[in-house]
Amino acid sequence: MIRLLGQSFQSGTEQVLEFARTETITGWWVWAAVIVAIAAGISLCIRFYRRDVAELPVAVRWTLIGLRLTAIVGLLFFFFDLVRRSQSRVTRVSEAIVMVDVSQSMSLPSSQDANAPRRSDLAIALVEDNELVQSLRSEHRTSVYAVSDTEQPELLATWPLQPESSEQSVTPEQAAVDNVAKQKFAPQSIAQAGGLSISIGLVLGIVSLILGAMAPRAGMTDSLARGVTPVIPPRVIWRSRLIAASAVCWVTGLLVLGGTYVTQTQQTLAQLLGRGTSTQSLTGQADAQLSADEQESTIEQEDNISDPVLQWQDALAATGSQSRLGDSLRSILLDHNLSTLAGIVLITDGQNNGGVALSTAVAAARRADVSVFPVGLGSSRSPTNARVVDLEAPRRVYPGDKFAISAVLQATGESAIDVDVELLDGLDDQAANEGEILTPTNNADPKRISTTLPGAEVIDRQTVRLTPEQGLTDVRFEMEPESVGRRRLAIRLVAPPEDRNRADDFQMARYEVVARKLRVLAIAGGPTREYRFVRNLLYRDDSVRLDVWLQTGQPGMSQDADALLSAFPPSAESLFQYDAIMMFDPNWSMIDMASLDLIDRFLTQQAGGLAIIAGPVYHPRISGARADPRSVQIAGFFPVNLATRGVLLGGGRQGGANPWALDLTEEAEQAEFLWVADSPEDSLKVWQAFEGVYDYVGVKNAKPGAKVYSYFSDPTTEIGGSLPIFMASQFYGAGRVFFQGSGEMWRLRGDGDEYFDAYYTKLVRWISEGRLLRDSKRGVLLVDSTRAMLGQTISIRAVLVDDQFQPLQKDSVAARVLAPGNKVTDVRLLPAADAPDGGTFVGNFIVTAAGSYEVQLTVGETIDEEILRQNIQVRLPTSELERPRRDDETLQSLASATRGKYFAIDSSDSLAKVSQTLTETITPQPQVTMLSGTPDAEFAMRRNASLMWLIASVLAFEWLVRRLHKLA
């Protein structure tokens, strides 16, 4: 199979014969004149010859007429110019598309039964276990796309056409040998038969001449002149019959031998008659004479070597935040050859909550005459059910620090439901509660799915009316912890008896109450407005102990801080007491190489946090002092690659005239420290309403592994197709480093002081997370996001030491991920490339279900074994939960409008039947194109020679017969 621009072809070559003169004769009247002329010439020939040879025996009369007609036919062949040319047949293979919805609504149950598999599991079973792709590729080139929140669907893989093999297979080598044998013996046999016929005709002609010498020479014409029927002697009759037989054998032999000689251009006349040996090798003949089918078979076998292999569980994981079915269908129609597109199989639940309307794609499919075959997954009815969609709680709080717990509830059904919402709280005793998991397995007894959090008690309760038409309902509780330690809280619904699924009435989250204060060191190159606002904020926070080093400060000055420093902490003991370092456009020249090494150890070994708030005064000097060896170390701390030239040439802006909003990325929507309002959705609205900033410092791009949260949105600052990075972060060893492009977040106070306070408070706690979690001497376990959206990829980072407190040297370590539903997944962590000394391991996994996840990593031996833990709360996006019902009306309309067929899957039992029906329904639609080559010159030369032999021979034979019978 030949691939060209994404289109699949099959090719084959065959020889065709055609009359070239017919292409130059145009118009019906020209053809009429030619036909009349030919018919008139043949009629006149027959008429005149019948009059001329009327006195001769019947056999002789028809022999002379046949010889003359043979000459005329030979001239007609020459006139119409019979040519042979190679004709290539190019077949565009029929194509089938399978589109699978991988939006997060596909993670919902496939029916109202609590034990039902997820919709995405049914989709995977359909394409993999029931071999839908393998069935389709027997007649089509088959591509599988993942459809989610992007305008262009993601191409997962393409499988070439693989027709079902026949029972009796023939190897290409054997087929070549057989083909050569046929070509070697069949043409020679035919040519030799023609030569034999000519020889027989020659013998019969000689015998007829001998009889002619003994035949009467006069009397027949005189008898006819007197009107008396002559008596023909038997000897004359036999002679005439011999002449006729000789003519037939002669002409037949010439036609057979000449036809074989003309068509078999690869052999000489001597070789055809068995008088010479072929110079073409057996293998060469096989390669030259492979039939079109054999060529296709060989090409296809080569193509099958690279069949793609997919891990369907990962490829079709329900990760998208939207279902953009309309955009995806329209993109498929634009990107594929519509003449060969036999059909599109769309596996979805029918939601289309992003991009263009589905009707737009339907209209495009109708115009293109492409049938769509929707396969609907999920329940077609809205069951009476109340569920906890999401639970949001802080991961770390301080005694006496009141905090809020938010829950999102949803109801489905025909009418409103009144539910009691309870808040439970208790100690997180992992040893006592092992096996008492809150989220049930698929095989759990529904009566045991409750409601209990071992050792916990109900501390608050609310009664809420849930209305299906209302969509999602928010519930808020407040708590004020008193005891210190790891704890668990849960939201529980006391739903009415008609609630169909008790498995989703409960969600749990872990949090920790810490007694010690967060210790922060703030370093500023000057008393900027950003520095002063953040200093005052942290100093007023009772959970923070703040020390400051104002590098331009003078002895005796006053600062709102717990301690004032006049230099960078000189020792590891003095630096390692801090949890985070906040640097506001620092003067790096005042930090010597020994202090830079301490910062490196603070991050890599102590899991400390570092926030760099860049500014226009000292930041450009980092890259400007390239001769200083410290500049390499300083640049290494940043999650971005710094510009190599100053502000004017290296990018950046000072004193901008207009503010520009921050262009937030998808990472920003999932970053908890940017949630400055009560919910992620409200926080996004706050950032979108933020007027923006005026300035930024120039950087090149993000480092590998770094996450970018926002860009400076002025389009005139774009360089190399990318806007300047304004916010980014990365892991540095066990610690986190955050970069901000300018000290202008104080402008956020214009929208509300609480937004500025929430931003910096959460930022400081976020970068300090690794330090606060360092409850083991053997290491620390970190994740890049403790609150995630369904489908997000979670990065794990573990910094471990051995029993001698040296970096742990291993090829890999294994972590366990406890997912909702008691599902346990092993994740292999490999040594990090950015930690040459070892001890740092990284890995990742995808969250595929909403609820509480826990990552566990066991360190140490059996006696001193310790378990490092990290908790992640996963939620579904609002848009994917508003309409959990399968949209049969939309999918049926899509199928009807495009002349397709709708398949509604209500259980896994019907998957095999649907796969078989789809394969039978989608009719192959290949496109065949014939490409003509140039005429065969050797064929034309042999054709002319053969016609010359034929015409000359029949005319000579006619002349001899006429002379033998005394005709003029």
Image (cartoon, rainbow, N blue to C red):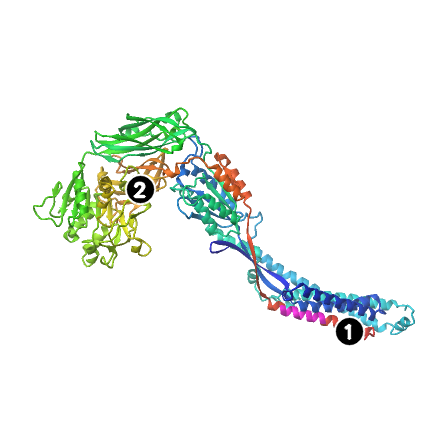
**Residue 922's image quarter?**
top right
Q: Position of residue 761 (x, y in %)?
A: 22, 40
- Disc 2 and disc 1: Cα gap in Å? 107 Å
Q: How crowded is mark 1: few (under 14 residues within 10 Å), some or many (20 or more)?
A: some
The circle drawn on residue 685 is 2
Q: Residue 682 carries which label?
A: none
Residue at the far left in the pictured view: 556
Give the structural element (helix, strand or loop) at label 1: helix
Magenta region includes residue 29? no
Q: What residue type is labelled 2?
A: Lys
Observer-nearest residue: 252 or 819? 819
**Residue 578 at x, y = what percent?**
17, 42
Q: What residue type is labelled 1?
A: Trp
Q: Magenta stretch mostly in which secondary structure?
A: helix
Q: Which of 518 and 883 is in front in this view?
A: 883
Query: Counting residues from the N terminus, which is met first, the one under dot 2 or under dot 1?
Result: 2
What residue lies at 26% left-to-right and 40% top-to-bottom? 676
Is residue 32 left or right of 801 when viewed as pictured? right
Pinpoint residue 8: horizontal percent, then vertical percent. Answer: 50, 53
Q: Which image quadrant for residue 873? A: top left
What residue would you read off at disc 1?
959
The answer to whether residue 891 is above or below residue 268 is above
| Labelled pair 2, 1 in contact (Cβ < 8 Å) | no
Left or right of 952? Residue 858 is left
| Magenta extent | 940-951
| Residue 807 relative to residue 282: left or right | left
